[in-house]
């Protein structure tokens, strides 16, 4: 086991990798000397990220490069790095360098002084982001805080430092739809905030366009809250009460000899009821789909190749590099352990 592991998920980050390697390596050596590993996860990049990682692994014995078999998404790529790392302390950081690597030392010091198992970054400011992005992020964190049963910190991303026992508790949760920051909050232990100013992206473009942000937000909400299902039940209760009132009104009108007119209003009611029913069915389908995916019990990720490192062991994924390098067909690779 090494003193420190630094986990960096990468998707089309070729332009950032040299700077990531330089700055994270310097920060790690200043904090723990040479007793660290830098784990880069290539999440199905379409640029030259994987060849760049291989070149870095050839010249740096502290670097481990993991090549996933396809694009699994940020949260599963991050899970692969966490699953395969060997550090006593684990730093999670993105490859865009918006979260400064130089904060590693102060975060380690905060962990030592507080006796905490998790030190999570809280963003005081977000340089280089649009007003729309800041506003939606602000609203998302507050909506999530109100809707979920777990106390998820406001304005905190995945940038955090964790102890090994906190990571082992996190890896005991094998669900497919992963919201890492929420899962870390769920495991408990002593968790300490660390305020910092987020910087501009070093190079390239954001890998979270609006569509992915909305999907991520919905995964977070449905993964940690039953509020959408409660909303559906409230809709049903409201419609039931409205139906009773409407029936009473129709009965009164019939008994008093009044004619009931209004084809337009009738169709409007039908359309509204149909729309609400479809919305409720969609919410139920989302939760049922999650149950279906969990029931299949597939590995969370598949590793195609590893450059550097020694004897990585997977709990949640499948290491297929043994099959790829085998002289005989049908190699078994390494499956998750129970």
Image (cartoon, rainbow, N blue to C red):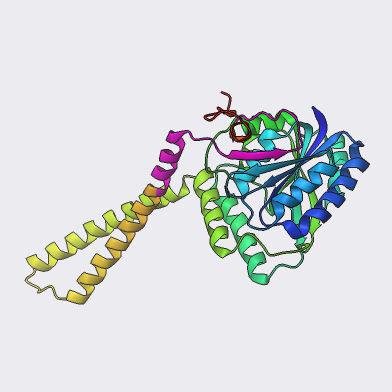
Q: Nearer the viewer, residue 256 or 221?
A: 221
Residue at horizontal 68%, vertical 70%? 130
Q: Is residue 69 visible?
A: yes
State which quarter of the image contains the N terminus: top right
Residue at horizontal 82%, vertical 30%? 2
Q: Which residues are magenta?
A: 286-315
State which quarter of the image contains the C terminus: top right
Residue at horizontal 84%, vertical 48%? 24
Q: Is residue 268 above or below residue 78?
A: below
Residue at horizontal 67%, vertical 62%? 206
Task: Single out the residue that lies furthest toward the front.
Answer: 327
Return the x and y of residue 19 as percentages of the image width and height: 83, 55
Q: Is residue 99 visible?
A: no
Q: Nearer the viewer, residue 268 or 31?
A: 31
**Quadrant in the rendering for residue 212:** bottom right
| Left or right position of 14 against 136 | right
Task: Single out the residue that lies furthest toward the top.
Answer: 338
Return the x and y of residue 312 as percentages of the image width and height: 70, 30
Return the x and y of residue 298 as percentages of the image width and height: 49, 35
| Left or right position of 7 against 209 | right
Q: Is residue 99 magenta?
A: no
| Left or right position of 319 against 290 | right
Q: Nearer the viewer, residue 215 or 61?
A: 61
């Amino acid at each position: 086991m090494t003193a420190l592991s630094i986990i960096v998920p990468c998707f089309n980050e070729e332009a950032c990798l040299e700077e990531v390697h330089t700055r994270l390596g310097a920060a790690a050596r200043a904090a723990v000397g040479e007793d660290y590993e830098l784990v880069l996860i290539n999440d199905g990049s379409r640029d030259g990220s994987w060849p760049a990682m291989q070149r870095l692994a050839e010249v740096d014995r502290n670097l481990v490069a993991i090549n996933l078999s396809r694009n699994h998404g940020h949260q599963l790529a991050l899970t692969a790095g966490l699953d395969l790392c060997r550090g006593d302390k684990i730093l999670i950081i993105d490859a865009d360098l918006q979260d400064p690597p130089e904060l590693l030392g102060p975060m380690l010091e905060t962990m030592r002084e507080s006796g905490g198992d998790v030190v999570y970054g809280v963003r005081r400011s977000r340089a280089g982001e649009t007003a729309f992005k800041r506003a939606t992020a602000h609203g998302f964190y507050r909506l999530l805080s109100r809707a979920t049963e777990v106390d998820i910190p406001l304005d905190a991303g995945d940038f955090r430092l964790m102890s090994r026992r906190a990571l082992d508790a996190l890896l005991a949760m094998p669900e497919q739809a992963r919201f890492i920051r929420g899962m870390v909050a769920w495991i408990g232990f002593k968790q300490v905030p660390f305020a910092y100013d987020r910087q501009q992206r070093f190079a390239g473009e954001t890998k979270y366009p609006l569509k992915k942000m909305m999907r991520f937000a919905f995964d977070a909400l449905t993964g940690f809250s039953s509020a959408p299902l409660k909303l559906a039940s409230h809709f049903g209760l409201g419609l039931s009460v409205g139906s009773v009132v409407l029936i009473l009104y129709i009965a009164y009108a019939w008994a008093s000899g009044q004619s009931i007119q209004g084809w337009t209003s009738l169709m409007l009611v039908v359309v509204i009821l149909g729309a609400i029913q479809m919305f409720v069915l969609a919410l139920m389908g989302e939760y049922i789909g999650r149950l279906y995916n969990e029931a299949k019990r597939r590995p969370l990720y598949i590793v195609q190749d590893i450059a550097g490192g020694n004897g990585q062991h997977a709990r949640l994924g499948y290491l297929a590099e043994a099959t790829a390098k085998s002289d005989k067909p049908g190699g078994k690779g390494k499956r998750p352990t129970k």
